[in-house]
Amino acid sequence: MPRRPQRNLPKPPHIFDRDLEWSELTAFATDEDPGPHLAVVSGRRRQGKSTLLEALTEATGGFYFAAAEATRAESLSLLGREIARFTDAPVPPSPQDWTEALELLFGLAAQRPVPIVLDEFPYLVRGDASLPSRLQAAIGVPFGRHLRHHPRVLLCGSAMSFMGGLLSGTSPLYGRAWLNLVVHSLGYREAAAFWGITDPRLAVLTHAVVGGTPAYRREFVANDVPEGLDDFDDWVCRTVLNPMRPIHGEAEFLLNAEPDVRDRALYHSVLAAVAAGNHTSGGIASAVGRKATDISQPLTVLRRCGLLTVEADAFRGNRSAYRIAEPLITFHHAVVRRNQALTAKGGKLDAAWSEARDTFLSKVVGPHFEHLCREWVAWHADSDTFGGLPIDVTSGTVADPVARTSHEVDVVVRGAVGQDQGLLLSIGEAKWNKTMDTRHLDRLRHILGLLTARGIDTTHTRPACYSGVGFAPELRAAAERGEVVLVDLPRLYSGT
């Protein structure tokens, strides 16, 4: 691993959060070890990767090249021009292939460590598939001709399926990277701070639409932030429902920009099925009118692209739940796509939202609140909350043979108590728009009885209720007696 930087490189004030990412990038860029080093920076679009890398090159005197969709010849010509600007050369160099281009790039770091950023790297490989092999040859020879050089090569891209395979076992660059950095969306607490939203209920509603993608506030809605709960409906109409605003078509672009997506109609239908509440492969297949085998490839591709996630059922090992990773895509398929006739050309936006608002609350906000509750446990709950360290947080289904039904459990927490690992620390229920009472606690106690009957150790398990509205007095009294853990919106956003 790279050593920490010798120089003090404070994070630029225009970069929000990203302290860990900045630390890792500066450590890599300023490492003094001889020879070329390689880093891969990836993440879904609009997360701020380019902003980070541009700031890095500005802070270190590095070289930044943003590739375009172009032929190999044009890409090499554009690169030559950027090298001339960087070196103040009167005549741009004219590399004939990527071997010559890499020689020129590595020469920029002859005297000191220099970060060399190749942004939108997949475009360059699309123009010349030999580039990864040529790069491997340039950096992979021990004690080779580049040992005296200090290039810190950073390859960046948003095509997650491609970037994920760049360091795989079959890639020429396998085992060559000193750093593999994925720039994720902002966490829900950080997103609220980024949008300047202090009301936790408004923060959940907004996050259910735009998630934690930084660009959606600045470039895509021009810093139009809902002023309060009373303004939220109008904000939806003037931004994401409005076809004249760029955020309106962003969800479709995220899918269409993925190179591995072929049958776009099928892929959109798969996402629409998940947005409608179908989370198993069988349920998704039924919703799109295909056999389960017909959608296995789309599900795999969507996972590789980072647009779908999959998690195993906490209590049924043969069952998994698919969920959309980007809230804007869920909103698009649950709300926008179904009301395109009303929103066309910017007309009848209020009518479209009036038609879709109940669907938004039930199909979008409800499941999203459950996800935020799981995220709270994973990132913010301390060991005292559940009597142990949370390690695995998911959802699950518990069969009830006597009643011939099954029970959905929104938050399942497993973790460690002392030396014991994998203990069931908590099962929880989340209700976005309902005041919870002792009936919800009784349901959780019933589920615990079913789990105990199956031989699962529940001696450390604490019931938990998560509510976006609040709790009845008798449930709060049970919490005071230590019978249940209660998590409301203030705790979700500022508590442990």
Image (cartoon, rainbow, N blue to C red):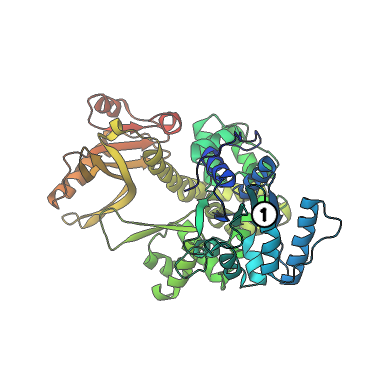
Is residue 245 positioned above or below 379 on the image? below
Q: Is residue 280 above or below residue 61?
A: below
Q: Tell me which corner region of the image, top left, top right, bottom left or bottom right, holds residue 89.
A: bottom right
- Choose between 378 and 33: the one closer to the eye: 33
Secondary structure of the residue carrying tag 1 is: helix
Q: Looking at the image, which residue sits at the far right?
A: 90
Give percent across and percent down for residue 221. Answer: 68, 44
Toward which corner of the image does residue 419 lie, by quadrant?
A: top left
Q: Is residue 289 visible?
A: no
Query: What crowding class fits label 1: few (fewer than 14 Cα within 10 Å), some (14-19), or many (20 or more)?
Result: many
Q: Is residue 414 above or below residue 225?
A: below
Asked where in the image residue 430 lies, by quadrant, the reply is top left
Q: Is 230 on the left or on the right of 437, as rendered?
A: right
The location of residue 456, given as percent across then percent down, is 16, 49
- Residue name at image x 59 percent, y 46 percent: 29
On-image quarter of the C terminus: top left
Amino acid bearing label 1: Thr
Q: x, y (%) of residue 263?
A: 56, 73
Residue at 37%, 62% (x, y): give it.
280
Q: Is residue 130 left or right of residue 246?
A: left
Judge left or right: residue 350 versus residue 400. Answer: right
Query: Is residue 233 something one can see in this rendering?
Result: yes
For the point 47% across and 70% down, the residue is 170
Query: What is the tally of numbered marks visible in this picture?
Result: 1
**Picture coordinates of residue 31, whole percent (x, y):** 56, 45
Q: Nearer the viewer, residue 92 or 46?
A: 92
The residue singled out by tag 1 in the image is 343
